[in-house]
Image: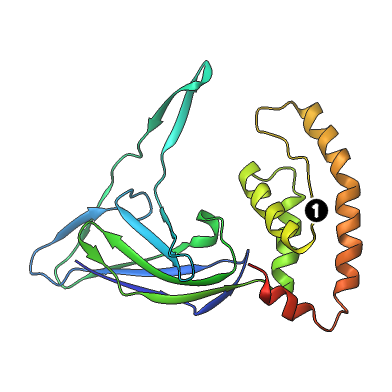
Amino acid sequence: MHITLQAAPQTALAKPLLLDVTISNPGSHALEIDDPAQSLAIEFHLVDQRTREDLSFTAGKLTATTFGSADQYALEVPTKRLITIAPKGSLSYRVDANAKLYLRPGDFDAFVSHKESQSNRVPVKVVLTRDSVALLFATARDAQMDYSRREWATDRLARLYPGFKLSLALPTESATARSQQETTNAPVYTRFAEWWRDQLTAPDLDQRLDKLR
């Protein structure tokens, strides 16, 4: 098995970070592998060049089922689906790392691994831009968005605007409680929107965004 990775050298935080992977079979016999879209064995890595932290994920995911209380649960492994790659053939697919990870600005080394095989390493830079701020704000204020994703967006915006502190509803809370929390958050949204509108004309805005980590 031979794995090749391609990715754009730079992307804005909160925008898609597309990783294009090609798995080739250089041998003379057919190669069977897990479907990359569901596999827990094929791992994607983004290693922070500054901290050396390995942010990794798989396209497949475990599903947790709870029984009665939060401390009683079972993990459901996705059904294995095999794909055959013909001799001298290949399989290509694409994954959005932004949809899988809670990224931050910085320089990363991206690569893919499967058992003993590793792809080439690709340098990827994630930058905070004006578009990033708009996307993060839209995510943070979206009451229908996943809790963890809203929490990530809120944390990133608080580094830019320390007054951006939200009351986020847990998935287990009632619709009434969620509505009340959004009422509490409304003034925070308004203050941030007004502050950000003023920042858009500041001559040093892009430089300040570039320095945030």
Quarter of the figure with the C terminus: bottom right
What is the count of numbered marks?
A: 1
Which is more toward the observer, 65 or 50? 50
Tell me where residue 27 sits by quadrant: bottom left
Residue most extreme to the front = 51
Residue most extreme to the top = 68
Quarter of the figure with the N terminus: bottom left
Q: Residue at x 49, y 22 (%)?
A: 71
Q: Is residue 167 left or right of residue 85?
A: right
Q: Is residue 88 above or below residue 146?
A: below
* Residue type at tag 1: Phe
Q: Is residue 200 left or right of residue 119?
A: right
Residue 205 position in % (x across, y down):
79, 78
Q: Is residue 119 above or below residue 207?
A: above
For the residue labelled by badge 1, is the local secondary structure a helix, a strand or a loop? Answer: loop
Residue most extreme to the left = 28
Residue 82 position in % (x across, y down):
24, 50
Which is more toward the observer, 57 or 143? 57
Q: Is residue 102 above or below residue 105?
A: above
Residue 146 position in % (x across, y down):
63, 44
Residue pointed to by mark 1? 164
Residue 57 position in % (x across, y down):
42, 54
Tell me where residue 179 sits by quadrant: top right
| Render colour scheme | rainbow
Q: Is residue 137 left or right of residue 190?
A: left
Q: Residue at x 73, y 66 (%)?
A: 133
Tell me where residue 207 sits by quadrant: bottom right
Q: Residue at x 74, y 79 (%)?
A: 206
Q: Residue at x 86, y 73 (%)?
A: 199
Mark 1: few, some, or many residues within 10 Å (few <14, many ≥20)?
some
Q: Is residue 212 left or right of residue 85?
A: right
